[in-house]
Structure formats: structure tokens, C-alpha cells
Image: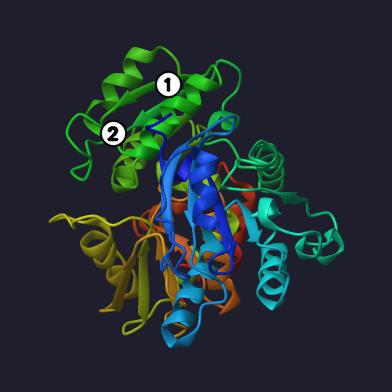
Amino acid sequence: MHGTPRGMRLHIGLFGRRNVGKSSLLNALTGQSLALVSATPGTTTDPVEKAMELAPLGPVVFVDTAGLDDEGELGQLRVGRSLQVLGRVDVALLVSDGRWGQAEVKTAALLQRRGIPFAVVQNKADRCLGKDRLPPAAVPEGVAVLAASARNGQGLDAIRAALVDLATQARGEGEQPPLLADLLPPDGLALLVTPVDSGAPRGRLILPQMQAIRDCLDHDKLCMVVTEARLPVALTSLGRLPDLVVCDSQVVSRVVSYLDGEGLPAAMPMTTFSILMARHKGDLSALARGAAALTRLEPGDHVLIQESCTHHPQQDDIGRVKLPRLLQKLAGGPLQFSWHAGRGFPAYDTSCKVVVHCGGCMLSRRQMLARLEAAAEVGLPMTNYGLAISLAQGVLVQALASFPDALHAFEELARPTGEA
């Protein structure tokens, strides 16, 4: 479990005023000194993430935030960063010391509007007099109010139990589709075409490829893994046609050309790892509409390329070299590009024509959907690397054939081939 990627962990946010004991509560819940604790208000100045195991939930990420009542110009920037965390948590604990004012009302409303299940924790319950106790009627209907003390351990088991309930709600409301198992019949066979990526450390596959193999194993499906150079040998040795061919976006045109050249049945589905991740992590139809926006790019247009992780760019980096080259060929001339990497993201620049996001393998589904929602709020279409590369190579329709709704969303908005 310690190796579970962050994008597959439940993200738990702690919100509240300064000095209500958020960091102390985090340390008490986990039994570790994960967060710096001080009696001085405002000790936590930036959101702090900690990946760990929390029984009985398993792999989680706790996100401790700065106080929602911070003051001054710098304090307001800290509050803004705390509220940005709402875009990357699955569930939340709103921590109070007995007070329920505008900070709590505003945060509770934001959590409800974002559909983030949460509970209210009245910390320092061991020191609260009756008049200081938070009246249950003050909080929104249906939200649990839990009394706790980080100092003496009161109520910690109840909070852990509440987190299990909240996690169940979060997973039920935003159910994540399988990666590929539902595309295969019983005893179905997936042929995974996986070039050795220069960005992956030696001896390892990139995360979407590993997840595809695990998804097949978890659902009793068969899979065969080959490089594109060994694809002809694989098809010959199988003795049957695969039920699904999945390939890396960078070799999709070569794979399609080979399959077409061999005269294999057009009904044999094929797609890319990145398109599978787009469905698994976000809204594939929305991302397909974003791909349609790429067909309307013109020279001089501004494109934002966004990544969910930070890495040292390679000589042949997809986001900074290959993708810009493909998009400029698609647009018929030079484009303007800007890049943003990391789990946080700024307000989207409405001067952009489209956002092209990475596959999001380091993000949770809620985090990816939050980015799609933020872009949609300012009328900015978003797609991802896999759809963009397949489009630029002329094979997106084939790669989306297994997903009729997404294919319809693309074809409905795409500029017809040859249209000026």
C-alpha cells in the first residue's frame, strides 16, 4: 500500500480557522507527528500533503490547510490557497473550536456546492464549557457534528468511522469507471502495445500501462504486452484475434496502419492508454468536445498545455516538443503556447483557445473533474494528450469507436475535413 500512487488515494482535507487545532487533530488521527504544531496562530501557511495508511480506509492523502480567517494581504493569499484545495480533495473535515461564523458558513457552502462529503469536528471538546459547544442546528442539515480532543484522544475513533462513511459517499457519487475491463468479454484478451518510454525510469513501465495490466488481472481478463516492433509476431502467435488493442498515443498511427494493412476486421476495437485514462479519470465526452476545438485552431492562436506532475523535460518531451509540433501542423502555422505543471493550477487564461491536459495519471478523478469544471466555467474547452495526438495523426475516430457517446460529441463539433 505504501507504493499506491497519489492519484489512487482518497484525499482528505482539513479546513478551519487558525488555531482550532487542525494540525494537532491530524497528528492525533494518524498517531504521527506529521504537521508542525504551535500555539501561535497561522503556523500552517500553505497546504501540506501527507500520503499515509489510515485504518480502516487504507492509502490516503491528508491535506492540512492554512486558517480560513487569516488576515492581511498575505493572509488572504493563504486563504485563497486553502480554498483551492477544494479542487483536489474527496472528503473533508471542517474543524471548529465551538465557533460557527462566516468562515465556517462560507466553507460549508463551498463544500456542498462542490459535492464534497464532509463532517464538522468540534475540536478541544475537553476544554469547552457547555456554552462553548457547537449547537448541531448551526451546521447544514445531514452533516455530522463530532466532538473531539486532539490532546486526550476523545472522539478520534468516531472521526475515523465518519471518514469511512464519507469515503463511501464520495465513491458512490463519483463512481470511477474501470480502466478497460468492461470493454472485454468474459475471458477477453487485451493486446497492450507499449513502447519503452524514455520518460519512464529503467526497469519500469509508465503508470497507465501498469494500471491496465493490473485491471486485466483484477477482472480475470487476459492480456499480452508487446512493443510495436513485436506486434506482427504477437498477432501471429496468439491464434486468435484480441478483443481490444490498446497502444501508446505516440505509436497509434503506426499500429492503425499495420492493422489496416493486414486486413484485420474493422470491428476489432482499438484505442490508446491515454483515452482509457481520460474516461477513467474524467469526462471522456467533454474531452472529446475539447479535441473538436483543436480542429478549429488557426495560426497565432494560444494553447495552454497542462501537466499534473512536475518532471525534468526530456529532449523529445511530449508536452513541450512533440505535441506543439503536431498541433502547429494541424493548425497550418505557428501557435502560441504556455505551460503549467503541478497539482495546483492558476485561473484559466481566457485568451487561450483550448487546454490540452496530460493523461492525469497522478490525479484523482475528482481532481481531474475539478479542472474540467474550472475550464468550462470560463468557456474554455479542454482535451488531453492522447486525444490530441490521435487527432493530429488522423486516427481519433478509430480510437474513439469503442465509446459512441464520446465519438458523437467529437463529430458533432469537429470542423469537417477540408473545411477552410
Can you tell which mark lies on residue 223? 1
| 217 left or right, relative to 123 | left
Q: Secondary structure at mark 1?
A: strand
In which quarter of the view is residue 98 placed? Answer: bottom right
Kindly identify the residue that appears in the image at 21 percent across and 56 percent down. 317
State the image coordinates of residue 409 (x, y, percent, origin top left).
61, 60
Note whether residue 411 is visible.
no
Note whether residue 314 is visible.
yes
For label 1, the crowd category at 10 Å Cα-Cα, with few meaning under 14, some 14 to 19 and many 20 or more, is many
Q: In the rendered view of the protein, which quadrant contains the C terminus?
A: bottom left
Residue 181 vs 86, above or below: the answer is above
State the image coordinates of residue 174 (x, y, percent, origin top left).
66, 48
Q: In the rendered view of the protein, which quadrant contains the N terminus?
A: top left
Q: Secondary structure at mark 2?
A: loop
Q: Amino acid at mark 1?
A: Cys
| 17 left or right, relative to 41 | right
Kindly identify the residue that appears in the image at 40 percent across and 39 percent down. 5
Residue pointed to by mark 2: 205
Residue 153 vs 351, above or below: the answer is above
For the residue pair 354 and 377, the one nearer the viewer reads as: 377
Label 2 with label 1: CB-CB less than 8 Å: no
For label 2, the crowd category at 10 Å Cα-Cα, with few meaning under 14, some 14 to 19 and many 20 or more, is some
Q: Amino acid at mark 2?
A: Leu
| 394 left or right, relative to 110 | left
